[in-house]
Image: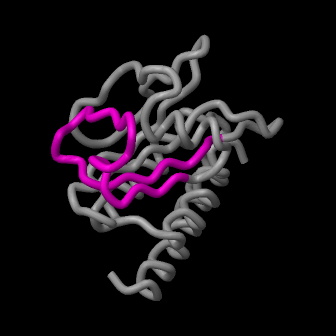
Amino acid sequence: MTPTKKHKRYERLYTQISDLIEKSSNNPYSNMATILAVLHHKMDGFFWTGFYLLQEGKLQVGPYQGSLACIDLQKDTGVCWAALNQREAVVVDDVEQFPGHIACDSRSRSEIVIPLKDKEGQIVGVLDVDSADLATFDDTDAHWLTKIVALVYA
């Protein structure tokens, strides 16, 4: 997908998700589920799409779309913990080159992780998206997914 086409698709999806949440939800878990369903089925290359949530110091799987997930992610290991600890989006073109990558599904080849912040600005989890293709994600994905994730606690 060209960068322009990707940008326009995200723009449409942001509007769609925002409208869905604004009209009918005040529940962050419902918002997460809605976001995941739209992204997973409307974005090319989204192989696994889900949230990992902080629970008593652990990152544990929350709502997701795709193949079976790891339930707990070992502390300070992998892309999800990197995004959480760095407090910013992390884009990985080739997960096999990422030190400490956690392979929940061996078909995953690239990944993007976006921190999830609550209304007070505290990080409470991450959005994790995997692709079965190398180098699927870029700055456009990071920009739009950050905006979309902010809708969870809007």
Count all numbered tags in the image, as a single digit: 0
Q: Tell whether 16 sits left or right of 48.
A: right
Res. 25 in view: no
Residue at 39 percent of width and 50 percent of height: 129
**Compared with residue 57, is residue 20 higher up or lower down, i.e. above or below?**
below
Q: Nearer the viewer, residue 90 or 59?
A: 90
Q: Position of residue 148 (x, y in %)?
A: 59, 57
Q: Quadrant of residue 42?
A: bottom left
Q: Tell me which colouring the rendered structure shows.
A: one colour
**Compared with residue 138, is residue 130 higher up or lower down, i.e. above or below?**
above
- Residue farthest to the right? 120
Q: Is residue 113 magenta?
A: yes
- Residue stretch rendered in magenta on the structure: 90-116
Q: Position of residue 120 (x, y in %)?
A: 83, 36
Q: Position of residue 1 (x, y in %)?
A: 32, 81
Q: Nearer the viewer, residue 130 or 118?
A: 130
Res. 15 in view: yes
Q: Is residue 17 magenta?
A: no
Residue at 49 percent of width and 66 percent of height: 141
Residue at 29 percent of width and 30 percent of height: 69
Q: Position of residue 21 (x, y in %)?
A: 60, 51
Residue at 58 percent of width and 23 percent of height: 54
Q: Nearer the viewer, residue 64 or 127?
A: 127
- Residue farthest to the top? 56
**Compared with residue 79, is residue 97 higher up or lower down, i.e. above or below?**
below
